[in-house]
Structure formats: structure tokens, C-alpha cells
Amino acid sequence: MRPGSLPWLLRWQTRWAWQNLSGGARRGLIVGVVFAVGVGAALFFLLRSLLAGVPLDRPLPDAALGPLTLGLVFVFTLMISACVTAALEALYTRGDLDLLLHSPVSPRTVLAARALGVAFTGALGSALLIVPLTFLLAVLGAWRGLGLLGWWLGAALLAATLGLWLTLGLVRVLGVRRARVTASVVGALLGASLFLAFQLPNILGLSGRGDLVVRLLEGFGPGRGGWPERESAVWWPARAVWSEPGPLLALGLGSALAFALSVPLLTRLFVSGVAATAEGGGGRRAGRERAGPLRFRPARQATLLKEWRMVGRDPELLSRTLLQLVYLLPLMASAWRGSVEGAASAGIVLLGASLASALAHLTLNAEDAPDLLVTAPRSPAALRRDKWLAAALPPLALGVLGVGLFAARDLLPPGLALALLGLVALGVAGSALLVLWRPLPVRRADAFKTRQGNTLGQTLLTLLFQGGLSVGAYALARGQAWSLAPLLVAGVALAVAYGGRGSDAR
């Protein structure tokens, strides 16, 4: 029997990437198609007005190269973020590489298949935007816009190359465990980098923020604001989208060459990283164990420390939490200056509740050794209460810190600060209780993937509870008389969840 070839490995890698993106269910495909149709309908009217005065058979004017380049940079950063996540999953999470590397297949072939799978994942994530946009450009008669597909494929290869270098380089410097966490955080920051760039004047509180952004956009173009002329490589991606032969060929060949050269150069790092994953850092752990005697802690303290260690090692949770903080940063900055009344209250409540929900899903549902917990010298109910407490304490501390900071700047009156503390505590405790009462056990590695089963009711209850508390906090800070109505909705959602709680949570 012949060993598996690159096409054979790539076929299974592509199938796995597609199932991982869509959850292996027809529902994921249907949602994607509906989203693509909606995006296409919105883009049709937008493109028809934008292309009204543009000669479609000629190169793009200089005025269009700047905005188009910014849009391509935004999509490319999202692709890099997706490729970093896919590289972590393909190289260090799936757990099948040790078996593959002991097979007759060469490590370079295995890495090439995984790298192409990473590129496929990066391209697939943006396909719901790129494919409808290209189709609409063709329908509107802009046949030169088909170059967008060439840019898309080249950008996917280049994003996969950068993602692999970043991931494997971090493994070499930091080790597998720390590299997984660091790469996830870096990927999240890359995905939000352009958002932060546009919101930087708002965050810094600069005067004339809208005019400043407009001036920056107007100054970004060929021959303007110190930027190079049209022939510079800076504008090649935008020109490649409009099917200019030279830039399109250079982008495609350059991306393919960088990808092809990176695979053999990264093979040694790839093999050493897989070996370190298989060993699990046993030497370092053994050294720590020899450093001192065993220490036994009280049962609750031991459970809390164990859960917090596992949370600190979860890269997916850290990246999600960081993105939540990043996207709330402009709102909180405006509230810090007192320019958005009530935004601080709603933001703090929403952040604490959503973080508690994510932590509770990880501590309560994603338990890889439930059989060991059954044999523990504690009752299952006590263990679940401790796990609930481990999920609730960190976001509660974060909420108390936020309320304290805003109260210290006299942005919150003392009475409102106390009421907001109560809402933060209710949001954190209730969001974790929703997970405790309606458990959905999953593997820790699959904790944040598309969940199977009927979760629509759980999702609706969570949205009603967290949304009701956030709107209520906003209305309460604004002194609105109807602030009790959304709080009542949140209470009803919590009561419904309590009435339908699972048998193991009673």
C-alpha cells in the first residue's frame, strides 16, 4: 500500500476545514447562503451608485486607489487572524500529527497539506464577502473586477504564510503552551487593528475627530500626503483587483513563491513543535515538582485554582475576551470623558455578563474528565457550585473595578454606583447560572465551536437576560422612568431558565 500523497492529505484537510467552519451541519451552509444573499443585495445598490461615473474598461482613477487599498487591508488583516487561529488548530490542537509524523509520509508533505488547509480556511472566512462582490461586479458590467478573485487567492496564500511563520516562531521562542495563548491574542489584535486605527482619535479624545478621519482618508492616495505615485508597489493590490496584468501577476506569483519557500524552511520548526506537544513539557513540570513538597489546599480553593489555571491556558477564551474589550474600548473612552451619558453603565454590565457566560461555559460544560469528578471526595453539587463561583468571581472583580474607577471620577453618583454594582453582580451571577441550570457538556477543545443540539432557547434566554440588564442600566443612568421594564424582562428570562433547569443542576 502506497503512503498518502499531498492531494490525499489535502482532500481530508479541506474536508475537515469545511466541517470545522460550518459545524458539519447543513444549517451552517444555509446560514452562509442567506448571509451571502443579504450582503449581495446590499452591495448591488451600493456598487450601482459607485460605478455610475467610472469608466469600466479603463484602469481605476487615483482617487479610488486609496479607499480600495484600505478595504483590502481590512480584509487581509481578518484573513491573517483566521489563518493564525487555523494554524493553531491544525498544528497543536487536533492531536493527530504525532501519528502522521510516524507514518511513511514525509513531514514536509504533512506541513504542506496543513499549510494549504490553513490558506483554505483563511480564504473561506472571507468568501461570503468576496464571492458575492465579484459576481455583482460581473453582473454590473465591470468585468475587470474579476481580478478580485486573483487578489483573494494570493492574499489567502500570503496570509497563511504569515500565520504559519508567526505561530511556529512563537513556538520556538515561547514554547507550545505560551505560544498558543500569545498567537491567539496577536491574531485577535490583528483582526481588530484597522478598527482601532479608525477609533484612535475617539479613544485619545482629539478635537475634531470626524474632520481628522476625513482629512486622513483624503490624504491617502497616489501622490498625496507624502504617499508614492501610482506605479509604487503600495498600490499594486488595488490595481490587481481591477485586473491590471502587471500587479495581478506580481501579486499571484509573489504570494505563491513565498508560500512554496516557507514550507521547507518551516519543516524543522514544525517537527520540533509537534515533538514538544507530544512530550507535554514533562521536563519542566518534573522540575517544578522537585522544587518543593506537595501542598494540599482546602477543597474549594483547590477547585478554584484548578479552574483558573485552565482558563488562563485557553487561547480561544482569551482572544474572545480581548476582542470584547477592544470593541468596547471606544464606547468606554467616550464615557470616561463624560460625552456618552449612560454608556459606561451599559458597557460594564454587558461586559461582565458576557464574560461570565463564556467562563461558565468553559468551567461547567467543558470538563474533559467528568468520571474523575464523580470519584472525588466531594458531592457533584458542591463541585458545580465551585465551578460556578470560579466563573463568576473574575468578571465580578472586573465590574467592581470599572464602577469604582467611574465613581472616582464623579461620572457616577454614589446612589447610581451602588445600583450599578447590584446590576453587575446580578448580570455576572445570572449569566453563570443560565449555564449551570441548562448544561450542555462538550469537550474543552470544542468549547467555542458551533454547538450541536437545540441551543436556540438557551441563546434567546441569554440575550434577553443580558440585553435587559444592559438596557436597564443605561436607562437607569439616564434617569428614565421605563428603566424597570427591561429589568423585568431580564428577571423573567432568568425565572424561565430556572424553571427549565436540567436534572443535574437541581
Image: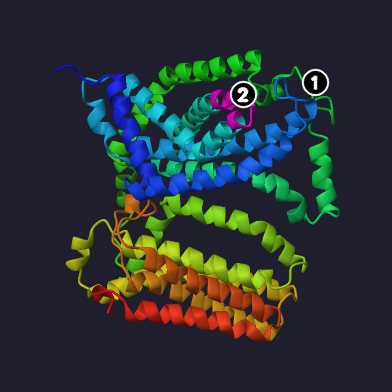
Between 185 and 375, the one lying in front of the other is 185
Decide: is 280 above or below 104. below
Q: Residue 443 at what x, y percent from top left?
A: 29, 54
In front: label 2 or label 1: 2
Q: Quadrant of the N terminus?
A: top left
Q: Between 197 and 367, which is closer to the camera in this rendering? A: 197
The disc placed on residue 143 is: 2
Q: Is residue 222 above or below residue 52?
A: above
Residue 245 lies, with reference to residue 298, above or below; the image says: above
Res 90 visible: yes
Is label 2 in a helix, a strand or a loop? Answer: helix
Q: Which residue is pictured at 74% across the width and 74% down the height?
A: 411
Q: Residue 69 has which mark?
A: none
> Residue sitting at 45 percent across and 54 percent down?
317
Q: Along the line of sight, which residue is nearer the eye, 410 or 438?
A: 438
Q: Residue furthest left?
A: 1
- Is residue 433 rendered to the left or right of residue 12? right
Q: N-terminal of the two: label 2 or label 1?
A: 2
Left or right of 97: which side holds 38?
A: right
Query: Which region of the structure is painted magenta?
Result: 138-151
Q: Residue at x 63, y 32 (%)?
A: 140
Q: Amino acid at mark 2?
A: Trp
Above-or-below relation of 370 to 500: above
